[in-house]
Structures are given as C-alpha cells and as structure tokens.
Image (cartoon, rainbow, N blue to C red):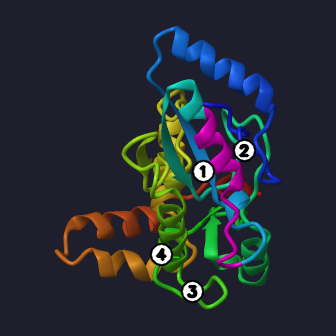
Amino acid sequence: MLPLDTVGPGGQVSRARALAVSLMALRSAGVEGVMVDVWWGVVERDGPGRYDWEGYAELVRMVERAGLRLQMVMSFHQCGGNVGDSCNIPLPPWVLEEVNADTDIVYTDRSGRRNPEYISLGCDTLPVLKGRTPVQVYSDYMRSFRDRFSGYLGTVIAEAAGLSAFTYLRMNRNLFDGDNWRRFVAFVKTMADGGARTALPRCDTGHSDLYVGFVDAAKEQRAPESEAAAAL
C-alpha cells in the first residue's frame, strides 16, 4: 500500500522523485504491484462533476515505468482523524457545504455528534448532493475514472476496486481489540441519522428479526453517562 497522500490534497503526486526510486526498489525486490487510495476529496474537489485525474495519471505512468502493476481503490471517505491516517484529505468542499446545510446526511451518534467522514448510507437514494443521490455521484465518478484510464485497465491497472472497505463504516484493524467491538455494535444498533430509521425497515423485506432486534436494543440500551446523569 502506497502512502495515503501519494496524491495530495492539491491533486499532485507527493515526493515524486523519492516515490519513483521507491517503486524501482520494490520491483527489484520482486514486488509485482502496489495499491493506492483514490480520494474523492482530491479528484472532485473543484465542484460537482469536475474531475482532476492528473495526479493519478502521473502515478500510473510512474508505476508503468517501474514495471509494476497498480490496484486503485475508490475512497469516498475522509482521510484524517482515524487510526492509521497520516494526512488530512476531507470530503470535497462542495459536499461539506451540503453537510453543513443538512447535518442529517452524515452519521450521528446518540449524543448528537456528527461525523463528517462519510455520507450516510441511509442517503444513498436521496438527492442530497446538489440534486444528485450519493449513488449517482459515485457512479458518475467511476465512469469518469473508466473513461480516463481505459487504456491502462487490465494492463498497468490490475484492479480498480469499487469502494474502499474503509469507506463503508470506517472500520480499522483495531475493531476487535479491547472494548471496540461492543462499542461498534452499540453504534450500529443506535444509528439515528440520514434516513437510517426509514431505510432499515424497507431493506428488511423478509420481515426477519434483524431490524426488530436493532430497534428493541436501541430503545432499551442507554449510555452509562446518560444513566448517571438521570440518577443525579
């Protein structure tokens, strides 16, 4: 995996000369390929539908010259503020404008704290991004990627992953450490944002116990700090 800021917030390859040397060294060591995050906040930073692929195009050419292959992962979440994040690349400014105008389109915890790292999955089919749904925005983005890099797909670009695993719920390698898993489950059970409450029952077409269990747990579970406050 290449550094998170291989293509920086301004759309240019970071430390290009050192990167070129490193790629050659990797090839000499027998490495076949590398992976890079393709940040939404970099590519579409200038406005809806205005895509700047030039930094990533330069990276593809560098990888080709080194005799390596490249896996490109579409990352629609913020980089920064989480475990392993070494740089800060927020969502595109025009998306953050929409978030500021309607904070319900991002994830929200039980205390009302908003998380601007990613657009809520509950909004996937709602036109909350300048008249487009998130799914439409992501689809347009990936079609633009396909058109820009069609000559490299299947050769230099060995794989273009549709969405980064980190994009969905910002999981990390510490998810199962200590108390993290219990806290994660509690978060899922008590989501209360961005259409999640209406989306869940629609998705549960089989009328299983899954949605009912989540709702019951959300009603019954109270945060320890809330219980302490109620006792005062």
Q: Residue at x 51, y 56 (%)?
A: 149
- Circle 4 crowding by C-alpha within 10 Å: few under 14, some 14–19, many from 20: some
- Distance of label 3 from label 2 (alpha carbons): 27 Å
Name the residue that disc number 3 marks.
Answer: 132
Name the residue type under label 4: Val
Residue 7 has which mark? Answer: 2
Mark 1: secondary structure: strand
Name the residue type under label 1: Val
Mark 3: secondary structure: loop
Q: Which residues are magenta?
A: 48-62
- Distance of label 3 from label 4 (alpha carbons): 8 Å
Looking at the picture, how far across and down is residue 173, in whole percent? Answer: 52, 31
Looking at the picture, how far across and down is residue 191, in whole percent? Answer: 52, 66
Front in this rendered view, residue 93 or 60: 60
Q: Are marks 3 and 4 in contact (CB under 8 Å)?
A: no
Q: Is residue 27 above or below residue 94?
A: above
Mark 4: secondary structure: helix
Name the residue type under label 3: Arg
- Distance of label 2 from label 4 (alpha carbons): 24 Å
Name the residue that disc number 4 marks.
Answer: 135
Q: Are marks 1 and 2 in contact (CB under 8 Å)?
A: yes
Q: Give the mark, 3 or 1, whose residue is nearer the N terminus.
A: 1
Q: Give the mark, 4 or 1, whose residue is nearer the N terminus.
A: 1
* Tag in front: 3 or 2: 2
Q: Are marks 2 and 4 in contact (CB under 8 Å)?
A: no
Judge from the rendering whether residue 23 lies leftward or rightward of residue 201; answer left or right.
right
Looking at the picture, how far across and down is residue 136, in whole percent? Answer: 49, 79
- Circle 2 crowding by C-alpha within 10 Å: few under 14, some 14–19, many from 20: many
- Distance of label 1 from label 2 (alpha carbons): 8 Å
Magenta stretch, main secondary structure, is: helix
Q: Give the mark, 1 or 2, whose residue is nearer the N terminus.
A: 2
Residue at far left of view: 206
